[in-house]
Amino acid sequence: MPFTTVIQSPPGPNAKLVLPGQGSTNPTTFNDAMIVRMRVFVDEQKCSAEGEIDSDDARSWQWVMYDPNSANAKAPVAVIRLVPPPQPPHALLTHPEDVATKGLSEFDWVHEPCIKLTRVAVMPEYRGKGLGRRLVDTALDWASDHPAEIDEAVAQLASMSDGTASVKKWEGLVLVHAQVDVAQMYRGLGFQTDESLGRWDEEGIEHVGMFRRLALVR
C-alpha cells in the first residue's frame, strides 16, 4: 500500500498549540506533524524544543505523510509546512542584533508577497525514498490550485495589523530557507539560490534563500 498524505488547515489565531505531552488540545494531524518535527529537528538536529512551535504554526497549512504498513497502521513519517505571506523582513533573521533592524515591522508588506515552505522533515528510517521531494510537490501543487485561500490568509492577517499593511495578491513566488546540505534537492525542484540573501545561521545550521515561481490557477 502506498504512503498516504493528509493536509492540516491553519488552526487559526485562537488555537492554543503546545508541544507533545503538554496536555495537548492540538488538532490530531498537527500532533502527528509534531511527532516528526520533534524527532528530526529537536532530537536529531538539536534545535530547541521551545522554538519548535512558532507564531507561523497557527496560520500555516501542513501536510503529513503516513506509512499505512507500519506497526500502528498510521505512523507519521514526513511533514512539510506552507506559511502564507507576508514573511518577516529578511534582516530580522540575518542580523537581529543590528540597531537598524529594531525599527522594522514584524512583517514585510513592501516587497512582492511569497509563500514559504518550512519544517520539511522525514523520519531517518524513511530517507532515501524521495518523500521530501514528494511533499514539496504536493504543497506546491496545492498552492497553485488555491491562490484565493492564500490571498484570504493574507487579508485576515492584514485586518489584525495596525492598518498600515499594504495587501498585495500572491503571484506565485515561493521561498525556502534551505539548509545548505539539502539545497541540491531544491535545485532539482526548480528553486534557484538568491545570492543577495547571503548565508545565515539558524539553530547552528547554515541556510540559504531559494526562490521559485509557480503558475497559478485563478
Image: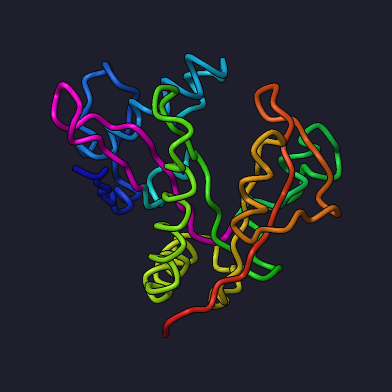
* Image: 128 above or below 154: above
Q: Position of residue 2 (x, y in %)?
A: 24, 45
In this rendered view, identify the residue nearer to me: 91 or 208: 208
Please indicate whether residue 110 sits to the left or right of residue 76 in the image: right
* Colouring mode (rainbow / by chain / secondary structure / one colour): rainbow
Q: Position of residue 57 (x, y in %)?
A: 41, 42
Q: Could you tell me which residue is drawn at 13 percent across and 30 percent down? A: 73
Q: Position of residue 71 (x, y in %)?
A: 16, 21
Q: Could you tell me which residue is drawn at 42 percent across and 20 percent down? A: 39
Q: Could you tell me which residue is drawn at 27 percent across and 18 percent down? A: 22
* Image: 109 above or below 13: below
Q: Position of residue 153 (x, y in %)?
A: 41, 64
Magenta span contains residue 82: yes
Magenta span contains residue 30: no
Give the position of the N terminus as an image quadrant.
Answer: top left
* Image: 46 above or below 138: above
**Highlighted magenta segment, given as a residue range:** 63-86
Residue at the extreme bottom of the image, as rendered: 218
